[in-house]
Image (cartoon, rainbow, N blue to C red):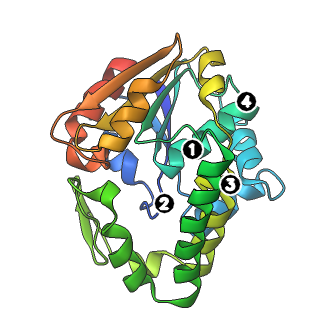
């Protein structure tokens, strides 16, 4: 089967395997879907194995081994968007078009990074010492998730697919590892990179997510567009999936 395009989805922290693909799929599109789910041990390890243990290199090498297509589109949500940025830092020509959903481009100062690290260390400790149920319940209570669809600790229905309880899918030690390894506190500030990327970029934020609305509005780049989605919070793909489907269709 010949595909019109390839869409590579980078799931966020605690994202289900294939979650973004389920939401973004459009029956009229002949698209190859590639899912990268860093929160799930087997997905992370498979991609890392393509790069001799280096996850980011593994993603780049794995994608470059695939047959070329006229449109290769990267879609990243939250932490997944930040991992997508790390891929672009090493391989700026990896994608023709990019959609960032509720993604932070990076903290600007060491003071901000130190403050963030103190917060992240507490979450990492909770993962290593407590139950995943308790962790997720606390995670969902964060201010950033106010006004958006809640995930919960049990089954979730996304699109036409019902995902099972999240707890058997995830492993505490692995979640703690990726939380520490890819903490926003350890990420570079990629605002300068955005100006250098020639691929078309759309940065998406939900209007109820005031923090990320402000971040998106302040971004600068000649190939960059901004989309503030009404009646949506941080999880735009869960709150307003049809808008993202339309955006992706226009990209292809």
Q: Which residue is mark 2?
A: 13
Q: Which tag, 3 or 4, sits closer to the chain's start? A: 3
Q: Of 1 and 92, which appears nearest the observer?
A: 92
> Which comes before the other along the chain, label 4 or label 2?
2
**What is the spatial separation of the Cα atoms under label 3 and label 1, in whole angstroms?**
16 Å
Give the vertical position of 178 relative to 196 (above or below): below
- Residue closer to the observer: 84 or 140: 140
> Which residue appears at 68% of the width and 22% of the height?
93
Q: Which residue lies at the image location 24% right of the left edge and 57% below the top edge?
A: 146
User: Mark 3: which secondary structure?
Assistant: helix
The residue that mark 3 highlights is 47
Pick whichever of labels 3 and 1 is earlier in the sequence. 3
Residue 91 is labelled as 4
Distance CA(mark 1)–CA(mark 4): 14 Å
Q: Position of residue 213 (x, y in %)?
A: 34, 35
Secondary structure beneath dot 2 equals loop
- When the figure is inspected, residue 73 is found, relative to residue 200, above or below; the finding is below
Task: Report if residue 31 is visible in the image.
Answer: no
Kindly report which numbered mark, 2 or 3, lies closer to the viewer in this rendering: 2
- Say which mark, if any, is on residue 82: 1
Counting labels gives 4
Q: Are marks 2 and 3 in contact (CB under 8 Å)?
A: no
Residue 210, image x, y percentages: 30, 41
Mark in front: 1 vs 4? 1
The mark closer to the camera, 4 or 2, is 2
Secondary structure, mark 1, is helix
Mark toward the start of the polypeptide (1 vs 4): 1
* Residue 15 x/y as whole percent: 43, 60
Packing grade of label 4 (10 A; few <14, some 14-19, many >=20) is some
Q: Residues within 10 Å of mark 2 (few under 14, many from 20)?
A: some
One can see residue 50 in this view: yes
């Amino acid at each position: 089967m010949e595909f019109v395009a390839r869409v590579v989805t980078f799931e966020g922290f605690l994202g289900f395997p294939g979650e973004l693909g389920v939401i973004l799929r459009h029956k009229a599109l002949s698209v190859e879907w590639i899912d990268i789910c860093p929160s799930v041990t087997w997905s992370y390890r498979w991609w890392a194995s393509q790069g001799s243990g280096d996850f980011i290199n593994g993603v780049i090498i794995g994608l470059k081994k695939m047959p070329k297509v006229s449109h290769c589109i990267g879609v990243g949500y939250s932490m997944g968007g930040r991992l997508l940025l790390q891929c672009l830092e090493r391989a700026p020509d990896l994608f023709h078009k990019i959609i960032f959903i509720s993604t932070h481009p990076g903290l600007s100062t060491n003071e901000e990074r130190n403050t963030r690290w103190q917060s992240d260390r507490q979450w990492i400790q909770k993962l290593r010492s407590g139950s995943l149920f308790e962790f997720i319940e606390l995670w969902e209570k964060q201010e950033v998730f106010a006004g958006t669809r809640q995930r919960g600790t049990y089954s979730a229905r996304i699109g036409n697919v019902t995902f099972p309880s999240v707890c058997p899918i995830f492993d505490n030690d692995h979640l703690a590892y990726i939380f520490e390894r890819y903490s926003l506190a350890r990420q570079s500030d990629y605002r300068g990179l955005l100006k250098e990327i020639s691929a078309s970029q759309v940065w998406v934020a939900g209007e109820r997510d005031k923090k990320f609305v402000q971040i998106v509005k302040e971004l600068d780049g000649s190939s960059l567009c901004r989309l503030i989605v009404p009646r949506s919070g941080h999880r735009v793909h869960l709150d307003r999936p049809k808008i993202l489907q339309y955006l992706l269709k226009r990209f292809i």
